[in-house]
Image (tube, rainbow, N blue to C red):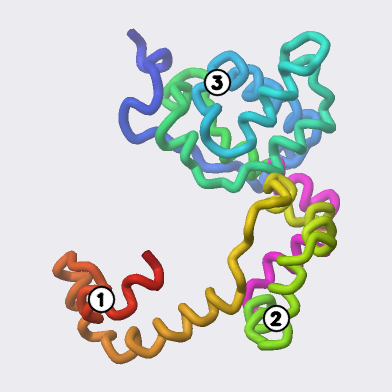
Amino acid sequence: MTESRREGSLEAPTRHPLDWRSDDFYDEKSLFDELERVFDICHGCRRCFNLCHSFPTLFDLVDESDTMEVDGVAKDDYWQVVDHCYLCDMCYMTKCPYVPPHEWNVDFPHLMLRAKAARFREQGASKRDRILSATDTVGKLAGIPVVVNAVNAVNRSKSGRKLLRFTALTALTTTGMPASLPTVSVALSILSRLEAPFSRNRAALARNIRCGKSTFHSWGGTYGHLVM
């Protein structure tokens, strides 16, 4: 069997660098041609059905189309697949049999990154994305006690959950309404209680890491139950 036809993922895959400086990288027709090519390969394989929501979304779009093939899926619906990819690399590193050195050269995460980059160049970042990516600002805001209590109250109320369901928070749109959400105060309490022993035991932590021991052993198990 030639190297180009050998199944991928039998060892560490070969990853080719993204040519993000070229004009073709952002060209809409070139991008959608490659999306259609890769989606057609994924549709014929479906080994990644149990990974991130990109794949069930893609397969549902194909199965519900008139042709039940990728050519029956509207190009605008491709963005649903792109939006559900969180670039975790699990499909590329562990599942896909068509990653390089296979001749089909499938790199799903890189393709999703290319699509996201092309859309960002064309449209820029939405207000939702700018807010959600400003983790330092959001973290400082969430640490204010009044804000913590208000967030928890909204999460507990039916009207608040309905409001969140129709906002830009994608994770909540796939969560059933009855599902419970963790209270912000609990998370902040755990972090604040862990901060003190962590700072006092920094040297012990470093020794345990070198020795391969659990961090919580150096704290005598006092705080281990909080995060287990």
Secondary element at tag 1: loop
Q: Which residue is at the front of the view, 120 or 190?
A: 190
- Residue at 64% across / 35% down in the picture? 54
Quadrant for the C terminus in the image: bottom left
What are the residue bounds of the magenta stretch? 115-136
Q: Which residue is at the front of the view, 56 or 23?
A: 56
Q: Earlier in the sequence, mark 1 or mark 3?
A: 3
Q: Which residue is mark 3?
A: 46
Residue kind at label 2, given as amino acid type: Asn
Q: Which residue is at the front of the view, 167 or 30?
A: 167
Q: Which residue is at the front of the view, 134 or 3?
A: 134
> For the residues marked 2 and 3, what is the alpha-carbon distance in whole angstroms?
44 Å
Whether label 1 touches label 3, CB < 8 Å: no
Q: Earlier in the sequence, mark 2 or mark 3?
A: 3
Q: Which residue is mark 2?
A: 149
Secondary element at tag 3: loop
